[in-house]
RNA sequence: GGGCGCGUAGCUCAGUGGGAGAGCGCUCGCUUCACACGCGAGAGGUCGCUGGUUCGAAACCCGCCGCGCCCACCA
């Protein structure tokens, strides 16, 4: 135990002074780095959603970090209490984040006046690794600031050698199953990153464009009119379609339209995709640049004419006189040319969804490209089953259906990316016979002809490797001790924006490759919005930096605040909640400081050191606080296990403020002796020891209970509260001791609290001086044990107590000479009144106003309850307990009214 | 077009069948020997609107108004 005397001058909890010192102790202790022992069912593990190496800590990380750390710390402590053999591990690592990292490195190169194409692939990748070595640990260091108890000794990276092997291994397995294949297909081309991206990386934006109606002549006379917002793609038209049931156009089917500007003859086909009631019901078909048209083209075996290239410009081959123009320029030029020929029949403003790249922010250009795909149908089935059967639980469960709906309609996944930073596909093309060799490591030569091999240039979608995260980080496919000890993990905590992108794919891959879902719970946490309700984003200037908040208020405050504001839905950032957390840390610090200093002063260090570690309740307030402690211990554990972090945090706050500090400490202060070591009101030494034992027990339990939420201040306090020199982070989590529950003490003390508040309110209204003690008579039942407490807390000098219904002698001083002094005012309290016996210096008119206001309130309340009890329907149908409760209330209110 | 969710005190949010709550802000009082990042006391709400179910609705149901998010290939 540290020297208590140090606390004398520390009147505030100063996070900056404490945090790094404590974190170093945690790291050095090895508590965060469990040996790979025990089995995964007993052990508790979480795989962190790997932050991007390019990233820095934002509010989402801070919230999710706080959530996971509460779970990890809680379970680590719970294991210490219940099953000392079980281990707790928070698997740490970062993601190589293909596009994001490549963009950063390219930016750096550009600043140096060079580019990736100038330096070549090998040099570029080397440069990217250098970049990662340099900047890749920033975010991990930032997690430490938050107090996150990850296993820092085992940090993983998705491009590490072992991990890369696992990725290649998976690719080979799924290729051999026939689920991974190569196809020329229409993809979402991102001109920004010059790569294909998956459907999930496309974000639609509502935009208003011009809808052009264009007349195409028919071969042999007549015309059709088609509508498009992308006239530049007409150069790639290879058909016109109408609905097969459309009476108007029945005889058009089979004829030819002549493509303006180009002259190509376009077959007119019938396809059910065409909406008869949209526009003219005649649709131009551009299979190479529209996903729907692509499908129609396949159905009707239409030509594919690519007019837009991967550079986002009109192609030389089919771009006609517009070749080389960027898409938007081409649009204008095409419209002008059509205009000149008088083919634009109409222009209308048209609002529609336009696809943009989530990564680069540029407009997606759908085009046909040779890419690698993964068929997901077989993988999705057991992943659906797992959620339906409850093997994977999604919390909150309204996301369950979203997951199931998406899974049921799952589509092939484009897994190849035209980038350099990532896992290069383990695919080797034979330069001689063109055979496709797929193998974990490069073969010596083609398996067919022994010819020279050339590895595929493309890399895998970053999410392909992320999908393996919970097991690849533990050494899979090797059956490592880590894998056996910690896989499957227990919970995956994340924001919902990556439910499909990542979580669903982990479930599919985990089941396929390990035979088990990678976690049993998925917890979807809130998205923290800016205080004004907008998105938190750097570009909008609405972001709030969690590190700055930690510097200002302390990590405990930020953790508490984020947990307290989190919810099952999105929430606005609340600086007040962070302040509340800061206040809590400071309050707990000062309460402990006060208790320890007083105990040591009044008992002496030696006696203090020999105190019983168990509570020794000797008074009603001792019994009360111990009973309340049972409640908060039960509630906090249940709330953490239910992922109800906000109530866990706020519940601790309410206990520390509303019960421990505001009442218990105030009630027992006088029994502790003064700070110079003099005796307090309670001169009985044994009673003082009993109080000290109870008080320190309550503080130790409270501090330990709060540790998962506010680890720094609690760990700091533990230095003074615990003489074993151990770290709180490795101690047992407090468990409610049911034998301390004491309903009688709770009823008695809560009555006294209510009465105290009533008297204080009255005092305030009559302008009584704060320090003055007022003579009064207690005329109420149920205060046998608490009258002295009430007198002290409400600053009353109680004389002549009159406690109806009891025989026990009043435990207060008795004024024998003036047994029946006339009351000058009366304050209603539960079970009766307090009669005020002296009006000296008091504004009794104000007292009367207050009294009559109270009376009016009581009368209307009584009216309401009486009305209820006179309602035959209520008496007949309401549960007996409710009816009895109302009767009891009426009795109580009536007593109070009579007393007034 | 489909789905999910929200609307409660000035602000941010809890409360989901039986006495309208918290934090911050506001007002009044307090240098009460742990904490002035403190202590005590207060003011402040037709619980979005309408109809229904019920002995009883902020809560459950129908509808409406307002707001947010997700999914979706109508040019």
Image (cartoon, coloured by chain):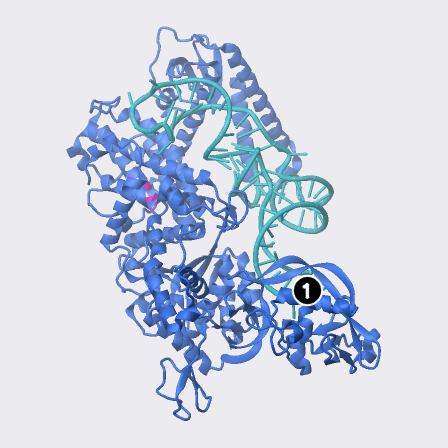
Chain colours: A blue, B cyan
In the image, is residue A51 above or below residue A601? below
In which quadrant of the rendered view does residue B45 lie? top right
Residue under the point 79% across and 80% down: A253
Magenta segment includes A195: no
The span shown in magenta is: A700-707
In which quadrant of the rendered view does residue A119 lie? bottom left
Residue at the farthest left position: A606
Q: In the image, residue A748 lies at what x, y percent?
A: 40, 29
Residue under the point 29% across and 31% down: A11
In the image, is residue A127 above or below residue B40? below
Q: A279 or A120, which lies in front?
A: A120
Residue under the point 52% across and 57% down: A397
Label 1 chain ID: A
Left or right of residue B64, residue A483 in this image: left
Can residue A390 be seen in this snapshot? no
Q: A228 or A823, which lies in front?
A: A228
Total marks shown come to: 1
Magenta segment includes A702: yes
Q: Quadrant of the N terminus of chain A?
A: top left
Q: A180 or B44, which lies in front?
A: A180
In which quadrant of the rendered view does residue A481 lie? bottom left
| Label 1 sits on residue | A332
Q: In the image, residue A73 lies at what x, y percent?
A: 33, 52
Left or right of residue B66, residue A479 in this image: left
Left or right of residue A336, residue A826 in this image: left
Q: In the image, residue A452 lies at what x, y percent?
A: 39, 88
């Amino acid at each position: 135990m540290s020297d208590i005397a140090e606390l004398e001058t520390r009147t505030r909890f100063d996070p900056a002074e404490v945090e790094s010192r404590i974190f170093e102790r945690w790291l050095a202790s090895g508590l965060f780095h469990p040996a790979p022992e025990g089995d995964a069912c007993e052990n508790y593990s979480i795989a962190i959603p790997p932050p991007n190496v390019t990233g820095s800590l934002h509010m989402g990380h801070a919230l999710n970090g706080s959530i996971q750390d509460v779970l990890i710390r809680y379970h680590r402590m719970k294991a210490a209490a219940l099953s000392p053999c079980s281990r707790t591990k928070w698997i740490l690592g970062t993601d190589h984040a293909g596009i994001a990292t490549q963009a950063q490195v390219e930016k750096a190169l550009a600043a140096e006046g060079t580019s990736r194409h100038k330096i070549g692939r090998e040099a570029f990748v080397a440069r990217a690794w250098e970049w990662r070595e340099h900047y890749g640990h920033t975010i991990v260091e930032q997690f430490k600031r938050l107090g996150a108890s990850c296993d820092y000794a085992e940090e993983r990276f998705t491009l590490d050698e072992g991990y890369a092997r696992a990725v290649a291994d998976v690719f080979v397995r799924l290729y051999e199953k026939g689920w991974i294949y190569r196809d020329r297909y229409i993809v979402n081309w991102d001109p920004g990153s010059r790569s294909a991206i998956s459907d999930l990386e496309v974000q639609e934006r509502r935009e208003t464009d011009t809808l052009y109606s264009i007349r195409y002549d028919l071969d042999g006379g007549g015309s059709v009119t088609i509508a498009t917002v992308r006239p530049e793609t007409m150069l790639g038209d290879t058909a016109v379609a109408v609905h097969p049931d459309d009476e108007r156009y029945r005889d058009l089917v089979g004829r030819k339209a002549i493509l303006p500007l180009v002259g190509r003859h376009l077959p007119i086909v019938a396809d059910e995709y065409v909406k008869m009631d949209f526009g003219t019901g005649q649709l131009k078909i551009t299979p190479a640049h529209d996903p729907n048209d692509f499908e129609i083209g396949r159905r009707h075996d239409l030509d594919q004419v690519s007019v837009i290239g991967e550079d986002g410009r009109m192609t030389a081959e089919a771009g006609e006189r517009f070749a080389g123009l960027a898409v938007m320029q081409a649009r204008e030029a095409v419209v002008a040319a059509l205009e000149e020929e008088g083919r634009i029949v109409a222009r209308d403003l048209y609002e529609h969804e336009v696809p943009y790249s989530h990564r680069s922010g540029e407009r997606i250009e759908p085009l046909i490209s040779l890419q690698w795909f993964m068929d997901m149908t077989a993988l999705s089935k057991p992943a659906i089953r797992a959620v339906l059967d409850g093997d994977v639980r999604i919390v909150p469960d309204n996301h369950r259906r979203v997951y199931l709906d998406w899974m049921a309609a799952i589509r092939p996944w484009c897994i190849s990316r035209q980038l350099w930073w990532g896992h290069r596909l383990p695919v080797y093309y034979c330069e001689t016979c063109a055979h496709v060799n797929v193998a974990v490591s490069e073969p010596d030569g083609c398996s067919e002809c022994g010819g020279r091999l050339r590895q595929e240039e493309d890399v895998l979608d970053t999410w392909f490797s992320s999908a393996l995260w919970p097991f690849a980080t533990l050494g899979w496919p090797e059956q490592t001790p880590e894998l056996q000890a910690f896989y499957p993990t227990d919970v995956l905590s994340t924001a919902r924006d990556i439910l499909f992108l990542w979580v669903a794919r982990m479930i599919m891959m985990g089941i396929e490759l390990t035979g088990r879902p990678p976690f049993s719970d998925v917890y979807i946490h809130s998205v923290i919005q800016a205080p004004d309700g907008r998105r938190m984003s750097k570009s909008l200037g609405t972001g709030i930096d969690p590190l700055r908040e930690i510097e200002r208020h302390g990590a405990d405050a930020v953790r508490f605040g984020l947990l307290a504001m989190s919810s099952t839905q999105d929430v606005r950032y609340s600086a007040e909640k962070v302040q509340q957390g800061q206040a809590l840390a400071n309050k707990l610090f000062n309460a402990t400081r006060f208790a320890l200093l007083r105990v040591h002063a009044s008992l002496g260090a030696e006696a203090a050191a020999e105190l019983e570690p168990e509570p020794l309740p000797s008074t009603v307030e001792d019994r009360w606080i111990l009973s309340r402690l049972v409640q908060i211990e039960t509630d906090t554990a249940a709330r953490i296990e239910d992922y109800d972090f906000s109530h866990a945090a706020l519940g601790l706050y309410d206990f520390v403020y509303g019960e421990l500090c505001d009442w218990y400490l105030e009630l027992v202060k006088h029994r502790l002796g003064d700070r110079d070591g003099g005796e307090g009101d309670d001169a009985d030494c044994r009673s003082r020891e009993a109080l000290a034992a109870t008080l320190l027990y309550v503080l130790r339990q409270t501090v330990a209970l709060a540790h998962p939420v506010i680890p720094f201040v609690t760990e700091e306090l533990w230095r003074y509260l615990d003489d074993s020199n151990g770290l709180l982070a490795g101690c047992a989590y407090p468990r409610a001791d049911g034998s301390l529950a004491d309903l009688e003490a709770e009823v008695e003390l809560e009555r006294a609290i209510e009465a105290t508040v009533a008297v204080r309110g009255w005092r305030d209204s009559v302008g009584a001086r704060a320090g003055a003690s007022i003579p009064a008579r207690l005329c109420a039942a149920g205060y046998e044990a608490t009258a002295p407490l009430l007198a002290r807390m409400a600053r009353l000098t109680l004389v002549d107590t009159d406690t109806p219904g009891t025989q026990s002698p009043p435990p207060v001083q008795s004024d024998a000479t003036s047994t029946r002094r006339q009351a000058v005012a009366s304050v209603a309290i539960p079970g009766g009144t307090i009669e005020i016996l002296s009006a000296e210096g008091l504004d009794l008119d104000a007292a009367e106003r207050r009294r009559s206001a109270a009376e009016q309130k009581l009368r209307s309340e009584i009216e309401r309850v009486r009305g209820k009890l006179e309602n035959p329907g209520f008496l007949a149908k309401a549960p007996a307990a409710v009816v009895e409760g109302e009767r009891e209330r009426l009795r109580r209110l009536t007593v109070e009214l009579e007393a007034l």
